[in-house]
Image (spheres, rainbow, N blue to C red):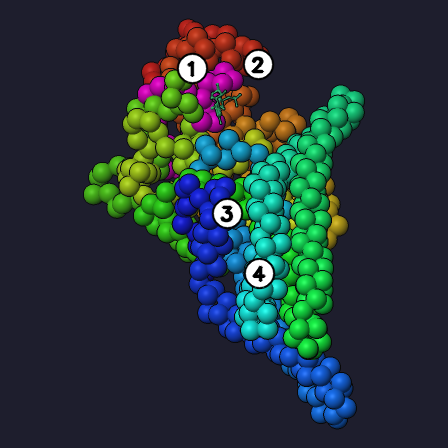
Amino acid sequence: MTGGQAPAPHPGARHSARGAVAVMYRLTAGHRPAIAVATVFSVGASALGLAQPLLAQKIVDASGHGRALWPLLALLAALFLAEAATSALGRFLLERMGERVVRGLRLSLVSRLLRLEMREMGRHRSADLISRVTADTTLLREAVAQSLVDLVTGAAVATGAVVMMVLIDPLLLGLVILTVAVAAAIVASLLTGIRTAAERMQAAVGEIAADLERALGALPMVRTHCAEEREERCIGSRVEGSYEAGVRTAKLASVMSPVVEVAVQGSFLLVLVIGGMRVGRSDSLGDVVAFLLYASYLVVPLSSVFRTIGQIQRGMGAYQRVDEVLHLPVEPAGPGFAQEAPGETGECRKPASPSPSPAVPEPGEEPAPVLALSDVWFGYGPDRPVLRGVSLTVPHHRMVALVGRSGAGKSTVFSLVSRFYEPDGGAVLFDGRKASSMGRRECRSRVAVVDQSTHVVHGSLWDNITYGAPDASLPEVEEAVDRANLRPVVDRLPGGLACVLGERGGALSAGERQRVALARALLGEPSLLLLDEPTSHLDALNEAALSQVMQDITKRCAVLVIAHRLSTVQNADHIYVLDAGRVIASGRHDELLVRSDTYRELARAQSLRVSGAEGDAAAPSPVN
Ligand SMILES: Nc1ncnc2c1ncn2[C@@H]1O[C@H](COP(=O)(O)OP(=O)(O)OP(=O)(O)O)[C@@H](O)[C@H]1O
């Protein structure tokens, strides 16, 4: 498997040993030449090892007959060295192959996770998904890299030993095989239990990560509610779950070990007793010595093969979790959104021309609006529509506002415009073109979003501002900083733009984070800026300043803004009032004060100018 490609699905091959072999086979696709070369080295090393008992036999017999020993001893030393060198090379090749397999899996996982459908993302806990990329693949690496080494070398040595033992004493070999077969039957019965326990343990590890992330992500809330003990108990129960599954695995594995040891010692004992009785008849102590050495060559690798199979079962438990992610649905690769293999994509950047021009209108013809929603229906679940036939337009260089009570569906409109979700009915249009006929990347390249969560990530202020345009020049960044009213923050921070912000932008206030997000959005030169609650973290002075910033921004792009505070959008060119997923009124501020009860209520609740509005209603003035 090459990096970035997920292995093909393997339904039904989940729990059986055959399934595990099939998974290992699939995982190592693309690495077979390396495995073949490594196997040749391992077999070569085994052959060199297998020749040593023969030589030992000769040395014992030669000393018995008083012949010179040093040439044989020198040959034995040379065999030792050659065996060590070839076996090291074979082992290295196999381990490197294992690392490559895991690298490919990790790249596939990362690639998939970054492109998961938003709905799917909502169904999983992010820390659990992360643990599949880190903890589960680490367990899998041990299974693939280490186990394959032991399996290949062990099987090669055991096969060679069997051949040599057949030649020396088939009866003794039969006895050894009998004891090993009994051990194998017992080990096989333990494997399913080991795998199930390993799956449980890995799932518990994922839950620990997810719960810990939840608690650390909301640490101030945990502290202010004195919930440390409660969180500790909750996470502690996950730790217990992982401990119990680990202990169960250990129990099963510890039963396996004595079984294998008894088989090894039993074989030796049998060989010693029966071989000793036969020495008198065969008249060769050398034969018994050689046979004993071969027996050790057979049972030692076989015991490691048994252990390895246990390890592979544990790895398969982890693979199950990895495999689930590899088959989660990702966003469809529409036109212009090719799903390049990881490594080929580089950073996700806006295209060179981030604000594609709208189709050139005929002379005298109005250009199509930057954004239009036409009778859009949408629900997060099948039974509950959140948007019910929403239609709205955002013309070029205008500021349009969405207002309405909490839960009316305003942010959902943004999610559809960002194409996190597709409408169930109706259409979203960019510059007159249906979004569904365009790739997601093309749609998103037209839009910049500053939402309520105002994402600021660990890194410098510069990194955060240039996140969407990593090649931006200093003057461009400076301009975005000024336009977003961020200059005082840059001047205050030590190192200015180079200042490293803590995780989630902890070094900044909420209002400052919002302005960083705005600077980032402006740097991308979008044709449409989506602002969700832009004033939610601002004081009155900064709110007034931002209103001015928004007016200025419309010189360069259109703005669609969501605001609870109507003071921010009083000057909007057009306002849509959303209620329970429907547009119930639209117009300018003064018009809506007259025409819309809901708008008037919202305004009254915020003590905005309402008096007299009922009397001086102006004619509606749609902006397009
Ligand atoms: N990811 C989601 N999954 C399921 N339901 C959701 C999801 N996001 C929002 N909703 C539901 O959709 C409805 C509209 O939510 P939305 O966030 O669009 O409202 P809003 O008008 O932006 O509210 P607010 O002003 O409080 O931000 C709400 O009832 C909300 O519970």
Q: Residue at x 61, y 45 (%)?
A: 186
Does 191 sit above or below residue 598? below
Which label was assigned to residue 580?
1
Q: Give the residue type that dot 4 points to.
A: Gly
Q: Look at mark 4 in the image and give the residue it sits on.
A: 174
Q: Give the residue type that dot 3 points to.
A: Ala
Of the two numbered discs 4 and 3 in the rendering, the one whose residue sits closer to the viewer = 4
| Mark positioned earlier in the residue sequence (2 or 1) | 1
Check whether the beta carbons of the residues at disc 3 and disc 2 lie within 8 A of each other. Answer: no
Magenta span covers which residues? Answer: 385-412
Of the two numbered discs 3 and 2 in the rendering, the one whose residue sits closer to the viewer = 3
Q: Residue at x 41, y 11 (%)?
A: 596
Q: Give the residue type that dot 1 points to.
A: Ala
Q: Look at mark 2 in the image and give the residue it sits on.
A: 606
Q: For residue 297, what is the image quadrant?
A: bottom right
Q: CA distance from mark 2 to mark 4?
A: 93 Å
